[in-house]
Amino acid sequence: MQARHTTFALSCLLLAAPVLAQDPPKMSPEELAAMQAYQQAGTPGPQHAGLALTAGEYTVTIKSWNAPGAPPTESTGSASRKVLLGGRMVSEEMTSSMYGQPYTGFGLTGYDNVSGKYWSTWNDSMNTGLTVAEGSCTAQATCSFIGHWNDAVTKQQASARMELRWTSPAVEVFEMFGAGPDGKEMKMMEITYTRR
């Protein structure tokens, strides 16, 4: 039976050989331009190389504020970042606790060659929705994002300003600011990542 399958496969390959040997069809200038545009859009560049430097294992300290002036709740945990898709993005998996409950989260961060913007997504065990953020970074290793998600209480889209900075080669600080109970912006969260 195996010999019959092998013979059949070889016969198919021999029949296809003249077709495979032919030159690929010529592309129009428009098709060639489109192909080149997609290749440029999909090729990792210096921004992606910078993101790849964040891959590694971290200890995290999380502070969360519910109201302006109130003391934050604090927890600790760990995060693991990995480079994906040939250097095109970085994933993050976090394990911690939040308000006394076990907490896990998963995010992706990348750079879009087409828009010229950095982007980030986040899912976690506290909801079933998706937070999507977009922003820019400077050469001094600071980033500013605006993120959006569906609020569980209001059932409306909520937004927050997110700031990211490296205070040293081993320490990264993430801060999130959003509307407080009075509608004014307040600091909602601070996560300090310390590379192990």
Image (cartoon, grey):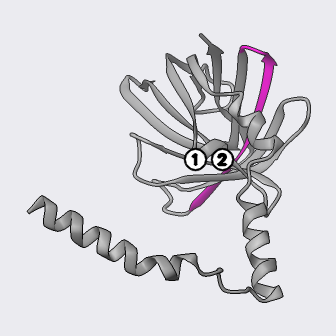
Between 45 and 144, the residue placed more toward the observer is 45
Q: Which residue is mark 1?
A: 85
Amino acid type shown at disc 1 = Leu
Amino acid type shown at disc 2 = Arg
Residue 72 in the image: above or below residue 5: above
- Separation of marks 1 and 2 at Cα, in angstroms: 5 Å
Residue at the location (68% across, 44% down)? Answer: 178
- As drawn, the residue found furthest toward the left would be 1
| Residue 123: % across, % down | 48, 45
Residue 26 in the image: above or below residue 173: below
Q: Which residue is mark 2?
A: 88
Residue 186 in the image: above or below residue 127: above
| Residue 146: % across, % down | 73, 50
Query: Badge 2 local density, few (<14 within 10 Å), some, or many (20+)?
Result: many
* Residue 100 on the magenta span: no
Residue at the location (81% across, 17% down)? Answer: 167
- As drawn, the residue found furthest toward the right would be 139
